[in-house]
Image (spheres, grey):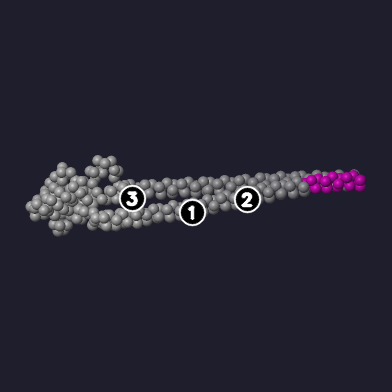
Amino acid sequence: MTDLDEQRRKVEELKRKILEQKRAAAGVPPAPDPAAVEAARKEEEAKQKAEADAQKRAEEEARKKAAEERQKAEEEARKRAEEEEAARKAEEEVRRAAEVEAKQKADAESRKKAEAAAEARRRAAEEARVKAEEARRKAEEEARKKVEAEEARRKAEEMRRIKEDEQRRAQAAAAAQARAAAMVSLQAYAQALKQAWMDGILSKDEETLLATLRKTMGISDSEHASLEQEVQLEVYLEALVDVWRDGVITPDDSERLENLRDKFKISADEHMRLEKQIRQDILKQRLA
């Protein structure tokens, strides 16, 4: 690294320290910490993932519950079928007994009555079986509809979550692009501002050009004021380094610095501190 590069680096460091002191005295909050921003973003992503995991667990529990209800309905239908089979067997035994009784009595009328009774019981059993089968089918249909409704709700929730994730990613990307564009605009405006103040005088044309740039780049008055303060300090520091590089300040140099101090509103105490620091840095470089 050359002496000039080292000198520039020290000027930048000194400028940064002075700006931080001014901002602290003025109550201006420091720039956001990139590490804190990144940590907040990771925390938000972890929160979103936890919410998605909780949603998946809730959906899984709902599916299990629907399956259990369907299994319970099938078990009840099976039990009803077994009861119907037992009733049918009992009725069959009764019918056979009636037939034996009818044959024993050898009474056609009694046989007819017995057959009529057996037929009535058969019809009753058949009706009961039909009702039980209908109830079983109805229970299975209801269980199937519950499962389908739950699946449809799960899919709808998944689509909603996907759309929300896409919207959040799009908003984050747009915000990042806006921040990057704002940073580029500020840097470009700072360069133009420094170029305008290099001679310590801001002409009408330069004021008009800077106003046009602020309007085009969307730079606020507060941002302009902050950048102008930084640029003026940087110009003054560079002027101090330039006049003290050979260790001697000429009357012209003194007049130039005084004009810059008046223009940039730099106090005598502040000038003395800056000058002392620069002279010490130059002396260290020469002794190194």
**Of the pair 166 and 119, the residue shown nearer to us:** 166
Residue 220, labelled with which disc? Answer: 3
The quadrant in which residue 29 appears is top left
Left or right of residue 238: residue 212: right
Q: Is residue 271 above or below residue 182?
A: above
Classify the position of the N terminus by image quarter: bottom left
Q: Position of residue 58 (x, y in %)?
A: 51, 46
**Of the pair 74 and 116, the residue shown nearer to us:** 74
What secondary structure is found at the residue carrying circle 2? helix
Q: Position of residue 173 (x, y in %)?
A: 40, 55
Q: Position of residue 286 (x, y in %)?
A: 8, 53
Nearer to us of marks 2 and 3 is 3
Q: The disc labelled 3 sits on which kind of residue?
A: Ser
The reply to whether discs 2 and 1 touch (Cβ–Cβ < 8 Å) is: no
Query: Which callout, 2 or 3, points at the residue further toward the start of the chain?
Result: 2
Is residue 108 located in the magenta-colored stretch of the structure?
Answer: yes
Q: Residue at x 13, y 54 (%)?
A: 242
The reply to whether discs 2 and 3 touch (Cβ–Cβ < 8 Å) is: no
Q: Is residue 104 visible?
A: no
Q: Position of residue 148 (x, y in %)?
A: 60, 52
Q: CA distance from mark 1 to mark 3?
A: 35 Å
Q: Residue at x 57, y 52 (%)?
A: 152
What secondary structure is found at the residue carrying circle 1? helix
Q: The disc labelled 1 sits on which kind of residue?
A: Lys
Q: Residue at x 53, y 48 (%)?
A: 59
Q: According to the image, label 1 marks what residue?
A: 163
Q: According to the image, label 2 marks what residue?
A: 145
Residue range highlighted in magenta:
106-125
Q: The disc labelled 2 sits on which kind of residue?
A: Lys
Q: Is residue 28 visible?
A: yes
